[in-house]
Amino acid sequence: MDINNICKDILALGADKAVGIDVKDIVFNTDFRKSCEENKCGNYGRNYTCPPYAGTAEELVAKVKSYSKGIVIVCTEKISGYDDMYGIQLADKRIADTALLADEYAVKNGFDHLVVGGSNCKKCTPCRAVTGGKCPLPQKAFISLSAYCIDTAKLSESCGINMVWDGTEVSYFAMLLLK
Ligand code: SF4
């Protein structure tokens, strides 16, 4: 398995950045769960890919650690400010689409893999978690990096990815994990 070639393939699928990382270098912060429980985003208990449905912090950290390599996938959009919902939603959609393509790519190549993120799954409106229905696409409903307690700021540092926080661009992250 050639990680550099996989990164090139992921870039060809539409990612703006694709960088290989050893899973042992990923930094987790289980305190992120406190923010989820405060429900500032309104998705706690309302999306199957968010807590508490997604699994406990310990379960999800262990799941990530069962893989050895990761490809960090980034999609970035220019925005006019953090109230530029069009640009923010565009980046969110692009990472979701790229994560799906990365999953299909991994299946096609026979990789033992897991796709993490981008943000929570938005394939149904609303998510069936709200109505108590069964998820129609459990294999394609990816859990977010934050639910996995992955520290995205430290992840970018490890990968040499420069995160811009001045309101001129927004970046969304996903990962393709490989055994
Ligand atoms: S596919 Fe639909 S029901 Fe399943 S997690 Fe995504 S939004 Fe929720």
Image: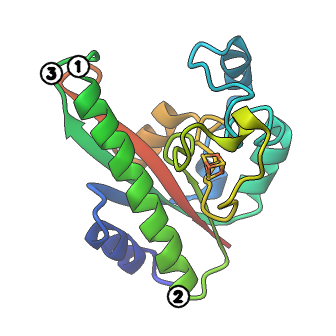
Q: Which residue is mark 1?
A: 167
* On-image quarter of the C terminus: bottom right
Residue 136, x across and y down, in percent: 68, 59
Give the CA distance from mark 2 to mark 3. 39 Å
Q: Is mark 3 within 8 Å of ligand 1?
A: no
Residue drawn 60% across the image and 88% down it: 110
Mark sitting on residue 80: 3
**Residue 49 as seen in the image, left or right of residue 105:** right
Disc 1: CA contacts within 10 A as few (<14), some (14-19) or many (>=20): few
Q: Amino acid at mark 1?
A: Gly
Looking at the image, residue 56 lies above or below residue 124:
above
Mark 1 lies on a secondary structure that is: loop
Mark sitting on residue 109: 2
Residue 65, x across and y down, in percent: 74, 55
Q: Amino acid at mark 3?
A: Ser
Disc 3: CA contacts within 10 A as few (<14), some (14-19) or many (>=20): some
Give the CA distance from mark 1 to mark 3. 7 Å
Residue 3, x across and y down, in percent: 45, 75
Looking at the image, residue 113 lies above or below residue 24:
below
Farthest residue in the bottom direction?
Answer: 109
Image quarter of residue 163: top left
Residue drawn 60% across the image and 34% down it: 146
Mark 3 lies on a secondary structure that is: loop
Mark 2 lies on a secondary structure that is: loop
Tag 1 and tag 3, C-beta contact below 8 Å: yes
Mark 2 or mark 3, earlier in chain: 3
Give the CA distance from mark 2 to mark 1. 38 Å
Mark 2 or mark 1, earlier in chain: 2
Q: Does the rendering let one see residue 164?
A: no
Looking at the image, residue 43 lies above or below residue 133:
above
**Residue 135 as seen in the image, left or right of residue 87:** right
Mark 1 or mark 3, earlier in chain: 3
